[in-house]
Image: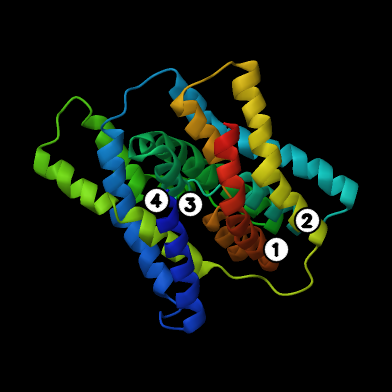
Amino acid sequence: MYNLVLLIVCFLAGVLLRWSGRMPEGGASVLNSFIITISLPAITLLHIHELRLGGEMLFMVAMPWLHFGLAVVFFLLLSRMCGFSRSVTGVLILCAGLGNTSFVGLPMIEAFYGREALVHGIVVDQLGSFLVLSIAGISVAGIYSGGGPSVQDIARSIVTFPPFIAMVIALGLLPFEYPLWLTAVLQRLGDTLAPIALVSVGFQLHTGRGGLDRRALFSGLLFKLVLAPFMLMLLYRGMFGLEGVAVEVTLFEAAMPPMITAGIVAEQYGLEPGLANMLVAGGILLSFVTLPLWVMML
């Protein structure tokens, strides 16, 4: 319980820092850079080294791809029914199709499932969500905005991403034991992930201005927080009969709110910035209610 309290306190601290003006506007960029270059690589090196490859890993990696595919089908059909514009359709696929499996997901996994379950979340995030964003997400943003990145740009973004590099190194070091001092250092650096990530999320929380299509906002949040994880639970539990902590954490990651980075990509490509902001902000706020409910259901 104290882990959840810590997350809420850090989240509120980030919100207060923004409202009070005590942290510069670019402060979140500094926090995010620290997380991406220090915290996430450290926790990846530590916990991927403890990974024992098994059959469930395929299902863990597949979840974000299945989630994004469901979003494409769902919102293409819904957009035809509701007459959404191309830009609204694009931002719904992007934001509701990608979950915040790192900045929100990993701290929440630690809070509800314990530190030992983090390795499952890291696999989902690095081998799943990150690749979906880098390949499918950027492609969708380009298609719906009229321009897209080259294959070289996508490949470069993947192979130069610090947590991805750390994961490759950790997999290469699987046969070897870490010295105690290295484990201790990685542990302490990894401990910074949860508090800094939630402060950053709280600081970046802002809402769009008027003129939003409320139907699009409601349908995006309903799909991301309820429908998609429910459909994936039926698939994994009902059809495949999968059980265990790894599967439970994977489904928990499916219930995460919209990815902050997806919202940023939507803004960069001019895809309804106001709607993107509201999907991210509303999703994060609602997830403090929905995620504990999913823990009870799973």
Q: CA distance from mark 3 to mark 4?
A: 13 Å
The first of marks 2 and 1 along the sequence is 2
Q: Nearer the viewer, residue 71 or 297?
A: 297
Secondary structure of the residue carrying numbered label 4: helix
Q: Which mark is residue 275?
A: 1
The residue at which mark 3 appears reads as 104
Residue lying at 83% horizontally and 48% vertically, measured from the top left: 79
Q: Nearer the viewer, residue 278 or 160?
A: 278
The residue at which mark 2 appears reads as 216
Secondary structure of the residue carrying numbered label 3: loop
Q: Are marks 3 and 4 in contact (CB under 8 Å)?
A: no
Q: Nearer the viewer, residue 71 or 257?
A: 257
Task: Measuring from the top left, give residue 284's x and y in whole percent.
Answer: 58, 57
The first of marks 1 and 4 along the sequence is 4
Q: Amino acid at mark 2?
A: Ala
Q: Are marks 2 and 1 in contact (CB under 8 Å)?
A: yes
Q: CA distance from mark 2 to mark 4?
A: 34 Å
Please identify the quarter of the rendering in which residue 135 is found: top right
